[in-house]
Amino acid sequence: MAAVTIPISPVAFQQINVPLSGSTVTLTIQQRTNGVYADISLNGTQIIAGVVCQDRTWLVRYAYLGMPGDISFIDTQGTSDPDYTGFGSRYILIYEEGRNV
């Protein structure tokens, strides 16, 4: 399956509602002093809370959570972990259907 880019803005705290694979996914992304963290909800039910976001590391990982795919940050200029100042440019957020099934 092809990866889909999820649009994010270069702000320290944001909440995004995005339709993915027929489900509504809500991502709450925030920069803290020691990194970027995310909460993930699927159709209004939180499935992940406070997961650390690292370069090229899948966030959901487990099929039993019900997510039909997985989400990851990608550093387009190297292998650094994401920082909000580069969201949407250096650091992109991708979704890949069927990734954790």
Image (tube, helix red, strand yellow):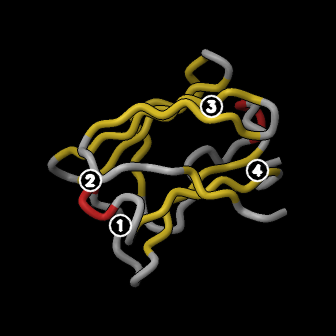
Residue designated by label 1: 81
Q: What amino acid type is highlighted by mark number 2?
A: Gly
**Nearer the observer, 20 or 63:** 20
Where does residue 26 sit, x and y in percent of width and height? 54, 29
User: Depth-wise, is mark 3 or mark 2 nearer the camera?
Assistant: 3
Residue designated by label 4: 100
Dot 1: what SS?
Answer: loop
User: Depth-wise, is mark 3 or mark 4 nearer the camera?
Assistant: 3
Whole-angstrom CA distance, mark 3 to mark 2, is 22 Å
Dot 3: what SS?
Answer: strand
Residue designated by label 2: 35
- Whether pointer 1 and pointer 2 mark residues with C-beta atoms closer than 8 Å, the reply is yes
The disc, 1 or 3, on the residue closer to the chain's N-terminal end is 3
Q: What amino acid type is highlighted by mark number 4?
A: Asn
User: Depth-wise, is mark 1 or mark 3 nearer the camera?
Assistant: 3
Whole-angstrom CA distance, mark 3 to mark 4, is 15 Å
Where does residue 65 sit, x and y in percent of width and height? 70, 31
Whole-angstrom CA distance, mark 1 to mark 2, is 8 Å
Q: Residue furthest left?
A: 33
- Compared across the picture, whether 44 is left or right of 83 comes to right
* Disc on res. 25: 3
The disc, 3 or 4, on the residue closer to the chain's N-terminal end is 3
Q: What amino acid type is highlighted by mark number 1?
A: Asp
Mark 4, other Cα within 10 Å: few <14 / some 14–19 / many ≥20: some
Whole-angstrom CA distance, mark 2 to mark 4, is 24 Å
The disc, 3 or 2, on the residue closer to the chain's N-terminal end is 3
